Image: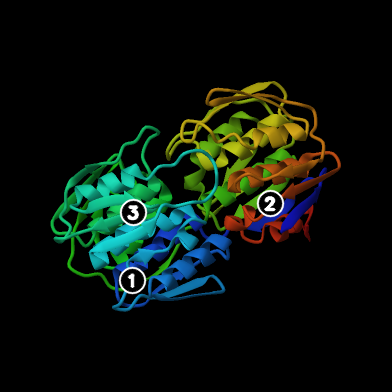
Amino acid sequence: MDKIVIVGGRKLKGEVEISGAKNSALPIMAATLLAEEESIIENVPDLRDIHTMIRLLRALGAKAQYDNGRVVVRPGKNIKPIAPYKLVSTMRASVCVLGPLLARTGSAQVSLPGGCVIGPRPIDLHLKGLEGLGAEIDVQHGYVNAQAKKKLRGHDIYLGGSFGSSVLATDNVMMAAVLSQGTTQIESAACEPEVVDLARFLKKMGAKISGEGSPRIEIEGVKKLRGAHYAIIPDRIEAATYIFSAAMTAGDVLVKKMEPSHQNAVIDKLTLSGVRLQKSKNSIRVRRTGKLRPVDVTTLPYPGFPTDLQAQMMALMAVTPGISVITEKIYPDRFMHVSELNRMGSKIFIEGSSAIVHGVKHLSGAPVMASDLRASAALVIAGLVAEGTTEVHRVYHLDRGYEKLETKFTSLGASIHRERE
């Protein structure tokens, strides 16, 4: 097992390029199962989760390989409808093979998913949506068993949940609906850019979809899809993490090969906090020369402030004079990083689904433990400004979502490296 060692106190300066979006790549890789022909996906990051999905596709009978940012999948005719526990339990996004398997083979046996421990994340909306299309679903012995005894049929489906819409549920229903008979209307669909990216890929395969990016998506089922060649969007969460790191260190960083329009909520909050951000076509320059100001943040579904940036925002507010309140509306239990930030000298108190952050003058380097992917990133950027040395343990979480993290930070002037435990 590895750890990341950071010596804080250096201002970040320079340029950094953003990798492809993991949260787009995984459902798009699953969507290749909807056709027999080869699909080629470009701009895919070299991450642990990507290679887990490659192994899952192979377990389902497809030929799949990754090479230098390109994934090639050849599903063929004989897809196996069983997604085993050993693979699905390690990565929550594995559940997005459920819709494609059901649409393509008429049945699916998929283990209940695993992944980061950030609170309960049930898949009831996935099952509700697929049942609306005519699937019969039974959950037993840790597996979802889905059958379509007759061809799936289009239907009006409402996917609103207790904490808003669900990205992966929208993905699963959309992928199942493209090969259904008739028309499907998804109400309260997720609006995230990754959902739009999946819809665009499906349309390149021959699907008929409209309304992606809005709360209502319409799908007109087709009889067959074909393979497609597609490049996925940049990772907006990775881009924002580097934006936060530049703000944390009072640096000057140009974040390149990204989509600025995906960062509007982040730009709004950082501008209020005193950070200067200059947008260009495919980049944002981040500069901070003065003191930070406290701001309150509430996580919401897109286009609101992302839950996947809550921990990074908390790290920034931890060194911001004054008091800020960060409220988590998507996963109310997603505060496992608070105790670790407090080990570094922050003053953060939990009250229900909110964190009250009392800014301190400085953080102190300390050994800390990563609990999930985004918490790991928050601890790293906290280490960049902490006095002394910070050791972040359990960095296998980081390897699920950040490509070449140490290399990119080193190129910006950070003192950061990886060691074996």
Identity of the amino acid at label 2?
Arg
Q: Identify residue type, mark 3.
A: Val
Q: Nearer the viewer, residue 211 or 315?
A: 315
| Mark 3 secondary-structure assignment | strand
Give the image location of residue 327, x and y in percent. Answer: 53, 27
Mark 1, other Cα within 10 Å: few <14 / some 14–19 / many ≥20:
some
Distance between mark 2 and mark 1 Cα atoms: 34 Å
Q: Residue at x 25, y 67 (%)?
A: 105
**Circles 1 and 3 in contact, beta carbons < 8 Å:** no
Q: Earlier in the sequence, mark 2 or mark 1?
A: 1
Residue occupying the point 21% across, 54% down? 135
- Percent x, y of residue 37: 32, 77
Q: Quadrant of residue 320?
A: top right
Query: Where is 362 relative to 51, above or below?
Result: above
Q: Earlier in the sequence, mark 1 or mark 3?
A: 1
Q: Is residue 105 above or below residue 406?
A: below
The front one of 271 and 122 is 122
Quadrant location of the N terminus? bottom right
**Mark 2 lies on residue:** 394
Question: Label 1 belongs to which residue?
Answer: 80
